[in-house]
Amino acid sequence: MNKLVWIGVAAVAAVLLFMVWNIETLPTPPDRFIQIDNTTANQIPQVDNSTTTRTPQPPPATAVVEPPFNASAYEVNYTLVFTVSLSGITMTVEGWSVIGVGLAGNYSFGMITVPLQGTATFKSATEGNTTYTMTCLHGFCTVNEEEWPFTSLIEGVNVTRTAKGQCRWLNYTGTLYEERGMLDPKAFSRFIEGLSGNYTAYVCEVNGVMLSADLTATASARGEVIRITLKMEAVKAGPYRPDTYRLILEEIKAANQ
């Protein structure tokens, strides 16, 4: 999966795993993915002969909406729900994230609510080979001039992707992918030693841009079974906004002085 899409929410995984640790099956494709087929077109309308005979009319054609974005330039606003279950305890994080990708630079910003921690906001922007990230919690903000160390948490190993058909999201037609892979133990070693497991994700992509994803991971560490789920859904998608990128980059750099 596109690492830039997850950069604004990857830290959630680290926070939840750390919190849950201290106090199973592979999923089937979600029903909300609409499979596109021709069964509707092959149905013959019933004619009502009780009054005037009517000529059967074909069903209205579905308009093809061309998206105003592609994999090299887009902005998507996602809602997200992240859960971790361990030893009968389940913790949930909810929030939203806006991801922008373009030639001038990439940006993200959003808000998440973490149990026992409160609501945190974040902003991130790239400049050349540097990623500036600002996170704020309880009015205190910190800025890092490097890629988030948590970003690699969502990168799998031995990943396979299989196209499963078509999907529709935000009135756009895209491709539904099933992705399977293993969690990278090195990515989690700073929080939990010996973590291993696998994940399955169903992703709806339009023009190479992820508009929705359902991910389930089952892992184990120190003899305990950990179940992780992540659901991301686009509520709005459009073209890349260079003005937004510049404003976020300037704000973060000013806060870092």
Image (cartoon, rainbow, N blue to C red):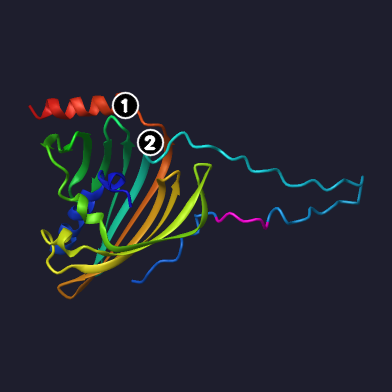
* Residue shown at the point (28%, 38%) measured from the top left: 110
Viewer-closest of 173 and 215: 173
Depicted 200 relative to depicted 244: above or below: below
* Numbered range of the magenta stretch: 35-39
* Residue 115 appears in the rendering: no
Q: Which residue is tagged 2?
A: 74
* Residue shown at the point (32%, 42%) measured from the top left: 96
Depicted 22 relative to depicted 222: above or below: above
Q: Which residue is tagged 1?
A: 242
Rendered location of residue 16, percent (x, y): 20, 56
* Residue shown at the point (19%, 25%) measured from the top left: 250
Circle 1: element type: helix
The kind of secondary structure the magenta stretch mainly shows is loop
- Residue type, numbered disc 2: Tyr
| Crowd tier of the residue under label 2, counting other residues whose Cα lies within 10 Å: few below 14, some 14–19, many 20 or above | many
Rendered location of residue 81, percent (x, y): 33, 51
| Dot placed on the residue nearer the N-terminal end, 1 or 2 | 2
- Residue type, numbered disc 1: Pro
Rendered location of residue 144, percent (x, y): 12, 38
